[in-house]
Image: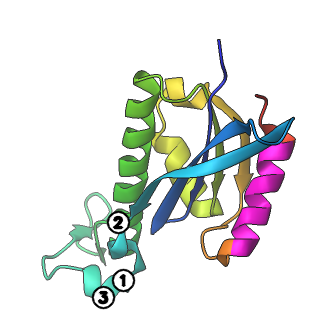
Amino acid sequence: KQEITWILIANAARALIYQAFENPEEKNHKDYKLIKVMTHEESRLKSHDLSSDKLGRYNAPMGSSRGKFMPDLDPHEKEQVIFAKEVATFVDSQLQQHKYTTLIVCAAPHFHGLLNQEFSDHVKNKITYELQKDYVPLPQDELEKVLEKIVKDHVKI
C-alpha cells in the first residue's frame, strides 16, 4: 500500500496543507504540492474587535457576596479554538476518505496545542512528525526550503 503524506503548516489564522509525492522526473527525488489553504481572519483581529457587548459571568466563592467579573473566554482564544476545530475536522474527514496515510504537523506552539486537543485519535495515530514552530509568515522561498527539508528528512515514499 502506498504511503501518502500530508504536511500541515499552521498558525491561528492560516493553515497550509501540502501533499508529498515522489517526483518521477528526478530519480529518488521527493516533492510536494499545496492542496488546501484554510484561513480564519477572525484570529487576526484584536480582542476588542471580536468581543460582543454581552456580559460574562460573575464568579464569587460559595457563600460570599464578594467576587470578580469573569469574561467567558478571551474572544481571541475562542476564535483560535474555532479555527483549530475547523482544521481538525477537515483533516479527519480527509483521513476517512483515505486521502492520506501519514501526517506531519508544524504549527505555532499555542495553536499546536489547540490542534492536538481537537484531533481525533485516528488522526493522532497518523502523525509521524511534529514541530512546534510557526512557518506560516515565512516568505515563499524560505517556506519552500523548510518544506524541502521536512520532505527529505521525514517523508518515506
The colour scheme is rainbow
Amino acid at circle 3 = His
Mark 2 Cα within 10 Å, few/some/many (few <14, many 20+)? Answer: many
Amino acid at circle 1 = Leu
Element type at mark 1 = loop
Question: Are the two marked residues, 2 and 1, in contact with CB atoms closer than 8 angstroms?
Answer: yes
Quadrant of the rendered structure where residue 124 is? top right
Mark 3 Cα within 10 Å, few/some/many (few <14, many 20+)? Answer: few
Of residues 128 and 143, the one drawn nearer to the viewer in this rendering: 143
Query: Is residue 141 shown to the viewer in this render?
Result: yes
Q: Is residue 126 magenta?
A: no
Quadrant of the rendered structure where residue 26 is? top right
The tag earlier along the polypeptide, 2 or 1, is: 1
Q: Distance between the Cα atoms at labels 1 and 3? A: 8 Å
Q: Which residue is mark 1?
A: 45
Numbered range of the magenta stretch: 141-152
Label placed on residue 79: 2
Q: Residue furthest top?
A: 1
Q: Distance between the Cα atoms at labels 2 and 3? A: 13 Å
Q: Distance between the Cα atoms at labels 2 and 1? A: 9 Å
Q: Main secondary structure of the magenta part?
A: helix
Q: Is residue 109 left or right of residue 115?
A: right
